[in-house]
Amino acid sequence: MQRRVAIIGIGYTPFRPITPDLSFKEMMFEAAQKAYEDAGVCPRRDIDAFVTCEEDFTHGRSIFNIHTPDNIGAVMKRIHTLPADGIYGVADAYMLINTGLADVMAVESHSKASNMLTPNYLVAHAMDPVYNKPLAYNPYFIAGMEMNRYLCETGTTEEQCALVAVKNKANALRNPEAAYGDRITLDDVMNSEIMFDPLRRAEMSSPADGGIVLVLACEEKAYALCDSPIWVRGVGWCSDTPSLETRDWGKAVYAQLAGDMAYRVAGIGNPRLEIDFAEVDDSFAYKELQHLEALRLCRPGEAGLMVEEGGTLRNSEFPVNVSGGSLGVGRLDEATGLQKVLEVVLQLRGEAGSRQLEDVQVGLAQSWRGLPANSGAVAILSNE
Amino acid sequence: MRKVAVVGAGMTKFMRRAQETGKELAWQAAKMALDSCELTVKDVDCVVMGTAPDAFDMVHMKAEYLSDGAGAWRKPYVRGFLGGGTGVFTANQAWYHVASGMFDVCLAVAEEKMSSCLPHPQGAFVTCWDQFTESPLGTSLLWFFAWEMNRYMTVHGITERDIAAVSVKNKKNALDHPCAQLAANITVDDVMKSEIMAWPVKRLDVSPTSDGAAALVFVSEDVAKRITDKPVWVEGVGWCLDTMYIGQRDLYYPKYVEYAARMAYDMAGIKEPRKEIHIAEPYDPFDYKELHHMEGLLLCGKGEAPRMLADGVTQRTGDLPVCPSGGLLGVGNAIAASGVMKVAEIFWQLRGEAGKRQVPGKPRKGVAQAWGDEMQVGTVIVLGV
């Protein structure tokens, strides 16, 4: 028997290419302060446990979690760090609340990607140190190879992938927090430089800075503290093999298994019918298509067609990445997944401004850990 | 809250420089833990990984790299991180994976490979500190320990010789541990005469750097009843993180350990830890830390731990055996893996399977604790039969 868990507070800083005015500590503080204000809680008195999601190397530090408690009001409390995407943090909080150990929790993640001068070299350190790192490739070649395999296996075209970038950047124009909104055409994408054949520059998300904090609570607390709790119906996460040599290059198996787990927890049998909209990982344009198929939000191999027919536009039957996604908002390192959860919460609360979707009850957020990882997480939220 | 049992444990030998990769170490420990309770990877519902800074092996997103080694292929898998406190937190994390009702069998694996950090893993800690207030001082981790040890000695009037006796005890205990790296018969004089690293810390006050891995299997009550006659129950968990600003804390007492211990004791219904805990594995990367942490764990009053040690209470045959495994000083300090090793030791002792290390008197409740970050985090688990 699971306890019901809801998101009762959200706080975030704007997502920008650079943030010279704030340190990561100040960004964490600002997001936390807004989230606690939104939830009407005092961290020292009301919050039982905290989770932060960050990797050491993206901060250029060892043991980053040393720096976490002071900025979010968690000193002398239960707080731990997951070197994982923010949706893993939501899943962790979901579990801890379900044990009964905590009633109210905060999940934090942020990106200060602008501090990283050479992100490619950083990603290179994530390669297998014995087999792959010594080859000293630019690790983004993996995305090119994966896209190539995906196109080959499904018959999806390069143009269909490019349309994802057109859609998401256009969506981002309606999101005041997004860093990379743009009105571009299919030709603009197709004519942009080929970076890792067949992947083009306009199909690759750019890094952005930003901090996000969510406050989660058990059912009793959620009703006591919040008028419009957004329920966490299901969470799932999964790691496929990290090995480049043996992985399935065409399919996002990790997303499929994470989705299956989340659907099981949420009791969802037919995701396409029971979910109203989705924020899926689009670090690279083709990834959105690959993830839609893995999550059974369209039939296998038909995501490209769905995008081409406009089936994922903001005003269509099944809007995907209405926030602008990582292509439009910017990739937020470990906070990428939380940005997707944040958008789903805003939509379900009816607070999404000019990009508000009509009549939505259930939304899905999905994240991928980024190159060269082969893992990710899913959260399913609903407003009833 | 579901009851959760530990049913299996395994660990590799801890050593200065392992030939195996991190993945291989993780798999050896995981396999041994699964074999010990006659489960296979197929029976595992989810995996949690504990491993300390990525900087040791210079692998970004280290958990992703280690995942298949830890047996997590196509399974829910996540890494928890609390600096040096990671090991025991990994056990706590495995506990809540099962206690939440989400999973029935959780494999907890901790791996550390420090030897690939050259010239010395100490270098990995240089980037830990606050870049404005601490890093410019050019501190090494040893300095922090020297401050803390000095403060502890000064406040309570404890001598270096009092503290050196911990190192003597633990290295001797480790002689009976098949995985130990630095087991030895030494005397207090040997410790006192060893090289001064940063006064009052001397070489033999310090645990070694190590490569190694350790693993535990956590299961729900119904699975435990099905597969074992001797489940060891997780009775309490606690973790607590203090402020990062070390200048704002009095280092003589680890209050964060006390908070974490109180969380765990409250959960376990323990009112008087000194009477109800039969065996303890506090974190001992430095010899004074064992004493410091005994006080934080409320196993004695503030400043009283050296007397307990002198009276022989904490010997393996004493009234309250402390670090019967040999601890980090004797077995080795493969950061996260050492924390799991401590939980594993309590598991083996409570099951009566600790071999030559077995403490007399059939202990029924034990506590394991780890510590880390910038003198800042306490993680505690209470196990019982």
Image (cartoon, grey):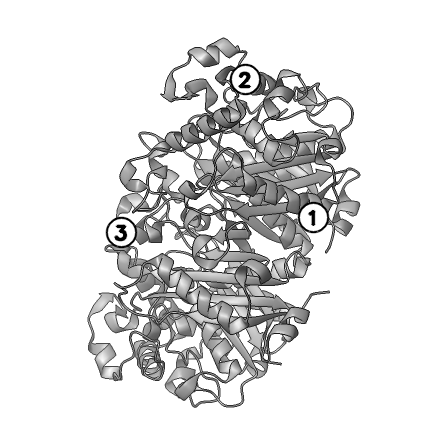
Chain ID of residue with mark 3? A
Which is more toward the observer, A179 or A298? A179
Quarter of the figure with the N terminus of chain B:
bottom right
Dot 2 alpha-carbon crowd within 10 angstroms: few under 14, some 14 to 19, many 20 or more: some
Asked whether the residues under marks 3 and 1 belong to the same chain, the reply is: no
Chain ID of residue with mark 1? B
Residues at marks 3 and 1, CA–CA distance in whole angstroms: 41 Å
Horizontal relation, residue B314 to residue B56: left or right? right
Q: In the rendered structure, which amino acid carries the disc numbered 3? A: Tyr
**Which label is found at residue B219?**
1
Q: Quick one: SS at disc 2?
A: helix
Q: Which residue is mark 3?
A: A121
Q: In the rendered structure, which amino acid carries the disc numbered 1? A: Val
- Residue depth check, mark 3 versus mark 2: number of the one nearer the observer: 2
Q: In the rendered structure, which amino acid carries the disc numbered 2? A: Asp
Chain ID of residue with mark 2? B
Horizontal relation, residue B41 to residue B320: left or right? left
Horizontal relation, residue B237 to residue A43: left or right? right
Rendering coords of residue B108 (x, y %): 59, 45
Q: Which residue is mark 2?
A: B162
Which is more toward the observer, B147 or A48? B147
Count of marks, rendered view: 3
Q: Quick one: SS at disc 3?
A: helix
Residue at 60% across, 40% down: B258
Asked whether the residues under marks 2 and 1 belong to the same chain, the reply is: yes
- Residue depth check, mark 2 versus mark 1: number of the one nearer the observer: 2
Dot 3 alpha-carbon crowd within 10 angstroms: few under 14, some 14 to 19, many 20 or more: some
Rendering coords of residue B314 (x, y %): 65, 22
